[in-house]
Image (cartoon, coloured by chain):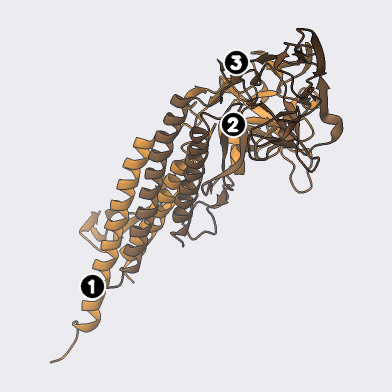
Chain colours: A orange, B brown
């Protein structure tokens, strides 16, 4: 069939993925610590079109058929990456003792148990913590925040956090938040609830550039203007691809119904 | 292939923002409720889904190709920070300055906790809330005229012959884990954690606040903050309606591929 038909169809699919990422970003425009994700699109491996025959090439006494390059042609588009934008979000003061913000590139470590790995350590920038029923500091989805000695038991919201992450309750140091930095944040994969998983198992390193602020939250880093503009361009691009498919369809209809008809 | 995911994300955003507006509305409606503590929603990103096998052409072998699918409200948390004090001069109005809750008893003996200290005296000599629930531990001699509540919670009355009789002691309650407190309506909270987590104490001792007679603690709702939240929620709601509309239009285009 006509190659362009499939190119245009893959274009529609890719624009759809873009629409999905934009909608997720906008839905989370008020989620603390949320990091926007984008769709990275690339064309399928391009193919070189070569014309057989073409002008004769003179080699000595012989005239040879020389293949002539016409140029390259794309075979449609595909999603090659969903890079996460790790830029910091705006900091908002909330005054809640359980709200914490990270100044710097680090992450809070949380215990996010997985099937077969109850001690799995994951990372988050969402510092909207709470004190759970058993008195442990936890993220909203229930995973416990980790300190140097495992989950941190603060008992109540009456605790203070020093910039270096030391948690002090009732005049005594309870624990110190485990803050982790990564040389390459691209090893992180997103999971539900603002949790990042270190897919390559690098483990990160003890934070040296990151400090903690208590009573503040990091807002989502979604730029709503960019997202809305992106949405318009997605729509139009989707529409253009749809028109292309219609045009090919009409072309095929002509081939089927008019070419070779005897009247 | 589905356009539904964008539709679903948009819808989840609409839902979340609606909850935010509901909470702001409740906070604002209670801005004049003594001792009221505001709430705020916690938003979380929904499950990430793999792009592979979702019908979208994607590079195979990269396990980071995943997209989130919207937002949800994990829970609604209450903010127990202190509200401002206003002086009312009413002798049975009590405010707690600092940590702690009053305990009141329901007619069926159930215990409730409150910081709304808008009390009155009933004919039997009890200090009662506006709904008639009795403040624990105080029984005044009926007919006593002038009631005096000290900062440490000691309740005394001035008799007709100008002598002073101590009638009781107001105790305050704290919880080792305030997450166990649940709003029970009428400005009251019930505690459903283990009884061992309830700590009683005299006002002004061991981390408890002091009692101030003739004062009321106002709601800790910040008008400006709530209005900002409302604007933010409304705009975010708008973005999400745009998403739903766009998803609908894209779907309609796909439907009209074949004329």
Q: From where the camera sits, is residue A203 visible? A: no
Kindly indicate the quadrant of the structure image that contains residue A128: top right
Would you say the residues marked 3 and 1 are in contact, meaning their CB atoms lie under 8 Å apart?
no
The local secondary structure at tag 2 comes to: loop
Which of pointers 2 and 1 lies earlier in the amino acid sequence?
2
Q: Is residue B109 left or right of residue A34?
A: right
Q: From where the camera sits, is residue A194 visible? A: yes
Please tell me the numbered disc located at residue A209: 3
Q: Which residue is mark 2?
A: A126
Locate residue A52, reporting x and y percent.
Answer: 28, 63
Nearer the observer, A111 or A247:
A111
Give the number of callouts: 3
Q: Which residue is mark 1?
A: A250
Real-space Cα distance between discs 2 and 1?
Answer: 52 Å
Please state which of the two labelled residues, at mark 2 or mark 3, is closer to the viewer: 2
Residue sticking out furthest to the front: B161
Nearer the observer, A154 or B48:
A154
Locate residue A157, reporting x and y percent.
Answer: 70, 24
Please state which of the two labelled residues, at mark 2 or mark 1, is closer to the viewer: 2
Which of pointers 3 and 1 lies earlier in the amino acid sequence?
3
Badge 3 crowding class, 10 Å Cα cut-off, few under 14, some 14 to 19, many 20 or more, is few
Q: Residue at x 82, y 24 (%)?
A: B199
| Chain at numbered mark 3 | A
Residue sticking out furthest to the top: B162
| Chain at numbered mark 2 | A
Q: Is residue B71 above or below residue B255?
A: above
Locate residue A108, reporting x and y percent.
Answer: 65, 27
Real-space Cα distance between discs 3 and 1?
Answer: 61 Å
């Amino acid at each position: 069939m006509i190659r362009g038909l499939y190119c245009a169809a893959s274009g529609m699919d890719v624009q759809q993925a873009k629409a999905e990422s934009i909608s997720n970003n906008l839905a989370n425009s008020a989620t603390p610590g949320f990091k926007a994700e984008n769709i990275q699109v690339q064309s399928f491996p391009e193919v070189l079109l070569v014309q057989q025959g073409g002008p004769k090439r003179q080699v000595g006494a012989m005239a040879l058929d020389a293949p002539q390059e016409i140029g390259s042609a794309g075979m449609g588009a595909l999603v090659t990456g969903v890079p996460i934008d790790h830029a910091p979000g705006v900091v908002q003061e909330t005054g809640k003792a359980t709200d914490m913000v990270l100044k710097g590139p680090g992450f809070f470590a949380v215990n996010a148990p997985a099937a077969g790995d109850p001690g799995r350590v994951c990372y988050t920038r969402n510092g909207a913590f709470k004190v759970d029923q058993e008195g442990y500091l936890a993220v909203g989805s229930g995973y416990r925040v980790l300190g140097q000695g495992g989950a941190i038991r603060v008992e109540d919201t009456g605790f203070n956090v020093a910039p270096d992450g030391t948690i002090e309750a009732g005049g005594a140091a309870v624990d110190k938040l485990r803050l982790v930095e990564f040389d390459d944040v691209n090893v992180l994969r997103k999971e539900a609830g603002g949790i990042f998983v270190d897919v390559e198992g690098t483990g990160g390193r003890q934070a040296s550039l990151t400090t903690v602020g208590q009573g503040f939250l990091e807002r989502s880093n979604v730029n709503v203007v960019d997202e809305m503009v992106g949405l318009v361009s997605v729509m139009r691009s989707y529409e253009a691809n749809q028109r292309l498919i219609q045009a090919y369809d009409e072309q095929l209809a002509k081939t089927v119904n008019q070419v070779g008809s005897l009247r | 292939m589905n356009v539904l995911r964008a539709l679903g994300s948009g819808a989840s955003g609409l839902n979340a923002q609606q909850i935010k507006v509901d909470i702001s509305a409740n906070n604002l409606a209670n801005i004049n409720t003594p001792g009221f503590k505001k709430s705020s929603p916690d938003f979380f990103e929904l499950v990430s889904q793999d792009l592979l096998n979702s019908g979208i052409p994607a590079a195979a072998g990269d396990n980071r190709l995943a997209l989130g699918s919207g937002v949800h409200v994990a829970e609604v948390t209450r903010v127990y920070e202190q509200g401002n004090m206003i002086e009312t001069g009413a002798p049975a109005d009590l405010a707690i300055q600092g940590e702690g809750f009053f305990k009141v008893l329901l007619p069926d003996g159930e215990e409730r906790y409150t910081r709304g200290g808008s009390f009155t005296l009933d004919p039997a000599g009890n200090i009662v809330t506006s709904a008639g629930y009795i403040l624990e531990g105080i029984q005044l001699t009926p007919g006593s005229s002038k009631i005096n509540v000290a900062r440490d919670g000691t309740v005394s009355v001035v008799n007709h012959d100008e002598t002073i009789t101590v009638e009781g002691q107001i105790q305050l309650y704290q919880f080792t884990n305030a997450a166990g407190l649940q709003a029970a309506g009428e400005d009251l909270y019930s505690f459903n954690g283990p009884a061992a987590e309830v700590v009683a104490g005299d006002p002004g001792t061991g981390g408890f606040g002091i009692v101030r007679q003739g004062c009321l603690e106002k709601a800790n709702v910040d008008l400006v903050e709530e209005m900002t939240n409302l604007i933010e929620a409304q705009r975010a709601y708008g973005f999400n309606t745009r998403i739903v509309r766009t998803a609908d239009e894209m779907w309609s285009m796909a439907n009209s591929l074949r004329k």
